[in-house]
Amino acid sequence: MSEAPRRIHFVAIAGTGMGSLAGLLKARGLTVTGSDDHLYPPMSTALADWEIPVHTSFRPEHVLEAEPDLVVIGNAVRADNPEARAAIDEGLAVRSFSDALYELAIAGRHPVVVSGTHGKTTTTSLVSYLLLATGRDPSLLVGGYAHDFGGSFREGAGPHFVVEGDEYDTAFFDKTPKFLHYHPRTLIITSVEFDHADIYRDLDHVKEAFRTLVAGMPQNGTLVAALGHEHVRDVVSNAPCRVVGYGVETEDVALDWLATDLDPGPEGTRFTLRGPDGSAQPAFAPLYGAFNVENALAALATAAALGIDPEETLPALRGFSGVKRRLEVRGEARGVTVLDDFAHHPPAVEASIGAAKARYPGRRIVAIFEPRTNTSRRALFQQRYAEAFDAADVVMVRVVPDAPIYSATGDVTERFSAERLASDLRARGLDATAHADVEAIVADVARRSRPGDVALVMSNGDFEGIWQKLLDALGPPDQG
């Protein structure tokens, strides 16, 4: 682009990253339009609030009539999408989301990129919050709704742009991982596990992507890595820059930053922060679960790498408000608390259940799970899911619809079975059932719930609005 674009059209605008970039550019005064065939909150609500016109289908005229200077194409868009094809065939300027984000928002700033199989959204929000709370005025783009920022993006005057770096591929015309396009000077790696089986063959393939990311770090950059995890240690072993290690409750590896003595309470988790100088000081995070304390530790270590002492960040950490759909309380009725969580990969499911138990000690956890990603609907993690639910008291699994599963790694020959998972969980001593639809799950919860239960709903999608349906079925909301 020889000149900065003034009119931008987004193809598949309702993705979290796409919608957030659209909102940021609209806030700058640009003319922004978009299209998508599947809109649901919170992004549908946010786009409406930002007064961005969105078509609810893909048609060539949506692009052509917008007369855009630039068309941004999301990674969910396939090569036969009529709007993408029209943009390319007409010779319009086209960018992937990742390249558009870098060129239009990040370039010229200090990119702080948060990568990892899990924990990216919370850690991105934490780092941004600590920078803001200590007066550094950062810019932000995160794959979720950050309560402290009232949304998923922020444009500040400070030097840092904090962005969530996803390992998923960039676009149908660019199969490199998205995080390679952000050119980090400071990089966080929270975790490395096998996921996204629709584009990665196996764990080694995932590691290859992370190694490429690490290899591209500048010599004067900083890599903040969860070295308590074996696979993270593996991918950073040949880093060309300084590596700062962090971890929780481990003595197996030397770490610069360590959290020990975790003690959950009514408002969050107390712990001891041990720093690279050998110091130990009390700390508190308004979060639950060892994985969330580890995310907070990553943010504290990153802030320190950017020159901000824990004397500033530890008091600020207490005020962190969290991220929507991360153990979010949707409401309470008949003594039952309904939580909304984004977990869908087995380790994330396991961690979220553990965090719920820490937050609500002694209460019965009713785990309600919807496998809806291209990976979770395959049989790859069938047995691992059975292990992930061990800490729950009751488990209800939605039966996977018999719909096509996208895969660039070969035909999908074996599908995940909710019925088999329920059977395996019963064999492990859990009260587990599989249900064909949302209404059946809601009826079962309403029939069997007890005062004090915690209904933990886990899905990376809208789950047909099950949270409100549960609250309606349970009865009037609790008062006080």
Image: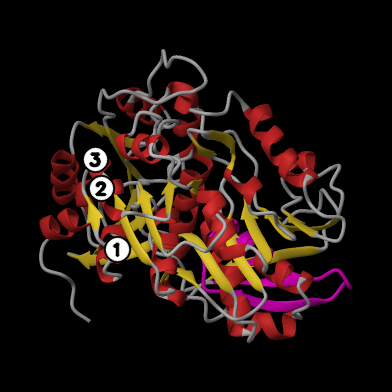
First-in-chain label (1 vs 2):
1
**Residue at screen point 13% across, 45% down:** 443
Q: Which residues are magenta?
A: 269-298
Q: Per the image, is 285 magenta?
A: yes
Residue 118 appears at what percent x and percent y?
A: 56, 48
Residue 246 appears at what percent x and percent y?
A: 75, 59
Figure quadrant of the N terminus: bottom right
Mark on residue 136?
none
- Tag 1–tag 2 contact (CB < 8 Å): no
- Tag 3–tag 2 contact (CB < 8 Å): yes
Q: Is residue 176 above or below residue 6?
A: above
Q: Residues within 10 Å of mark 3 (few under 14, many from 20)?
A: some
Q: Per the image, is 181 magenta?
A: no
What residue did someone put label 1 on? Answer: 47
Q: Is residue 86 above or below residue 65?
A: above
First-in-chain label (1 vs 3):
1
What residue did someone put label 2 on? Answer: 62
Residue 28 appears at what percent x and percent y?
A: 44, 74
Quadrant position of residue 203: top right
What's the amino acid at mark 3? Arg
Residue 336 appears at what percent x and percent y?
A: 24, 61
What residue did someone put label 3 on? Answer: 59
**Residue at screen point 39% across, 58% down:** 8
What's the amino acid at mark 2? His
Q: Secondary structure at mark 1?
A: helix
Residue 299 seen anywhere in this rendered image of the structure: yes
Q: Is residue 191 left or right of residue 66?
A: right
* Near-viewer residue (406 or 370): 406
Gap in angstroms between the C-alphas marked 1 and 2 = 17 Å
